[in-house]
Amino acid sequence: MLPWVVRRTGLPLLSMRCPDCRSESATTGDGRFRVNANGKLLDVWLLVRCTSCDRTHKLTVHDRAPVRTLDPADLDGYHTSDPELVASTLLDPQLARRNRFTLDWTGAWRLDVLSPWLDEPWPVDVEVAFEAPVPVRPERLIAQGLGLSRSEVLRRVKSEAPLRRPTSTGFAFTVMPTVMSKE
């Protein structure tokens, strides 16, 4: 079985409408939090920038949260804008739902094919693992990894995972040899 790994290369863009220029994407840029204290209550926001007009928006992470309810390590990470905390916060589906945005993973991941598949005996079994929850359609991933067209992938690949539905969990597939037509 050949191992393939999907790795995150950067943070995805956010698909959200800018109120100023009506652009539909934003970025976390350097990844900064803003923390505002109001007595014993804290507001924590993740700052994002519009990719077109450079306007800064705030995504609510915590709203009027008592200081004692926050994990001290997270609180320190908010103050220092820890890059790992920025990434995990941005990838939190509850944050996306609460702030009404989706993630655009275009260009934010890569596929590592660890060994050549052409030298393997047919049929070839491949196992795909995800280091980060990058949603990708298996047919596109397989087409990229094998250098085949998507229609050829649908003809030659057998998998229990649906090939046309995005997934962010590991799956396995088998590549069948090409069938020569008799003339």
Image (cartoon, grey):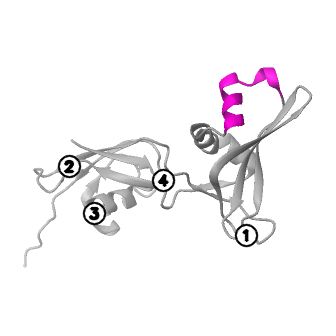
Left or right relative to 53: residue 170: left
Using the numbered discs, state the Cα–Cα distance from disc 2 to disc 4 in whole angstroms. 25 Å
Magenta-drawn stretch, dominant element (helix, strand or loop): helix
Using the numbered discs, state the Cα–Cα distance from disc 2 to disc 1 in whole angstroms. 43 Å
Which numbered disc, 2 or 1, marks the residue that appears first in the sequence?
A: 1
Using the numbered discs, state the Cα–Cα distance from disc 4 to disc 1 in whole angstroms. 31 Å
Labelled disc at residue 115: 2
Q: What residue type is labelled 3?
A: Arg
Using the numbered discs, state the Cα–Cα distance from disc 3 to disc 2 in whole angstroms. 23 Å
Using the numbered discs, state the Cα–Cα distance from disc 1 to disc 3 in whole angstroms. 45 Å
Label 4 neighbourhood size at 10 Å, few (<14), some (14-19), many (20+)? Answer: some
**Where does residue 61 sit, x and y in percent of width and height?**
74, 40
Q: Is residue 83 above or below residue 54?
A: above
Left or right relative to 128: residue 178: left
Residue on which the image places disc 1: 53
Q: What residue type is labelled 4?
A: Pro
Q: Which residue lies furthest to the left in this view?
A: 183
Q: Does the magenta stretch include residue 61?
A: no
Residue on which the image places disc 3: 155
Labelled disc at residue 166: 4
Q: Which amino acid does label 2 sit on?
A: Ser
Task: For marks 3 and 2, give the one nearer the viewer.
Answer: 2
